[in-house]
């Protein structure tokens, strides 16, 4: 992992080389997180590049990316570790035949229990441990980037469970004690704001909000990610996306939809946005029939405004 970050501009330049065009606020947040060893809570609408930010940070820092995808019902066993019960059962069966010999020289129940008690530690050793993303990050041989994606989908109990990790970079395993990070990972948590996160979690994190990009920023992103798209068509596409975001829609198009649309226009050899092209490809941009219907109603006026038919 890269241990020295020369400047914020170094981050911006490196991200751009990867096709991730970031704002000054994003570069600053990554710089401070790496220098202060603080997790970053990244909030914003879906599809604005929060997950991609973690990938870009990992590439920039030359660090492995470890990802934990959150969902309702996620618990410690899925996030931290599991015991390999099947392997433990097999181990038990192999031992069964040997127990008689192991206990032959004991002369009391207490001595037999003490002998068997030693086996208990073997059952809860690394041999039978299946590390999940959080434990993988703590035990990584090199500093890693840990992405805890969509933390707002997890239950509040799981959010509370993370507090020890986020503040002290350690976690408690009942059978093994406290596991402290060999190298402190750069932690990014993302949230689509589906529910309010706790103040305790927010206190442990730097905060970064990524909004929908402004037109110039979005055009730069499209140019970097879909360079095959002609500049004039790119400007039209971005203008229409920005126009759609001004409307009352159930789901506004995000940058990920802009990029999908741009790639589709390249595949279709489109040279400009006209009514037929837009009408045929709206489903790439809008995800509900209600929004598609509204966009079709608005399309003629927008095309007249930009001199298109």
Image (cartoon, rainbow, N blue to C red):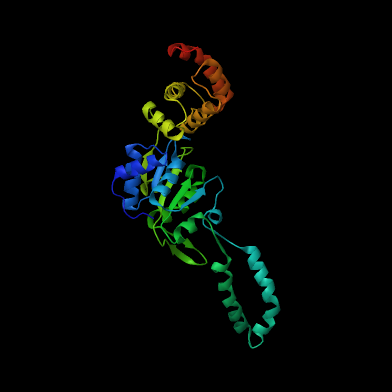
- Is any part of residue 294 visible from this angle? no
User: Which corner quadrant holds the N terminus?
Assistant: bottom left
Label total for image: 0
Q: Quadrant of residue 52?
A: top left
Report the residue at 61% width, 78% height from top. 116
Q: Nearer the viewer, residue 283 or 128?
A: 283
The image shows residue 238 at horizontal and vertical percentages of 43, 25
Q: Nearer the viewer, residue 21 or 193?
A: 21
Report the residue at 36% width, 54% height from top. 2
Q: Nearer the viewer, residue 292 or 263?
A: 263
Q: Quadrant of residue 10?
A: top left
In the picture, measured across the screen, residue 96 lies left or right of residue 25, that is right
Extreme-left residue of the structure: 7
Q: Nearer the viewer, residue 70 or 272?
A: 272
The image shows residue 258 at horizontal and vertical percentages of 48, 29
Extreme-right residue of the structure: 97
* Residue 290, above or below 300: below
- Is any part of residue 78 visible from this angle? yes
The image shows residue 292 at horizontal and vertical percentages of 55, 21
* Residue 143, above or below 6: below
The image shows residue 91 at horizontal and vertical percentages of 65, 71
In the picture, measured across the screen, residue 169 lies left or right of residue 123, that is left
């Amino acid at each position: 992992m890269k241990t020295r970050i020369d400047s914020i501009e170094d981050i911006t330049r490196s991200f751009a080389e990867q096709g991730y065009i970031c704002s000054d606020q994003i570069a600053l947040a990554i710089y401070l997180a790496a220098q202060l060893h603080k997790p970053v809570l990244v909030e914003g609408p879906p599809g604005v590049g929060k997950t991609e930010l973690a990938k870009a940070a990992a590439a920039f820092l030359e660090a492995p990316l470890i990802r934990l995808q959150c969902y309702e019902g996620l618990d410690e066993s899925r996030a931290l570790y599991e015991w390999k019960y099947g392997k433990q059962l097999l181990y038990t069966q192999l031992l069964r035949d040997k127990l008689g010999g192991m206990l032959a020289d004991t002369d009391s129940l207490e001595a037999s229990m003490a002998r068997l008690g030693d086996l208990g530690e073997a059952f809860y050793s690394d041999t039978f441990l299946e590390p999940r993303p959080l434990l993988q990050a703590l035990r990584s041989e090199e500093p890693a980037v840990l992405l805890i994606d969509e933390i707002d989908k997890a239950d509040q109990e799981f959010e509370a469970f993370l507090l020890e990790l986020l503040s002290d970079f350690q976690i408690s395993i009942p059978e093994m004690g406290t596991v402290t990070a060999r190298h402190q990972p750069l932690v990014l948590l993302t949230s689509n704001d589906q529910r309010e996160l706790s103040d305790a979690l927010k206190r442990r994190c730097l905060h970064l909000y990524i909004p929908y990009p402004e037109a110039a920023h979005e055009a730069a992103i499209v140019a970097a990610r879909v360079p095959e798209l002609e500049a004039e068509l790119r400007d039209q596409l971005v203008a229409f996306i920005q126009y759609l975001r001004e409307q009352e829609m159930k789901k506004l198009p995000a940058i990920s939809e802009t990029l999908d649309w741009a790639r589709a226009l390249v595949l279709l050899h489109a040279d400009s946005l006209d009514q037929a092209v837009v009408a045929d490809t709206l489903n790439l941009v809008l995800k509900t029939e209600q929004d598609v219907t509204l966009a079709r109603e608005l399309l003629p006026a927008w095309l007249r405004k930009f001199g298109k038919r």
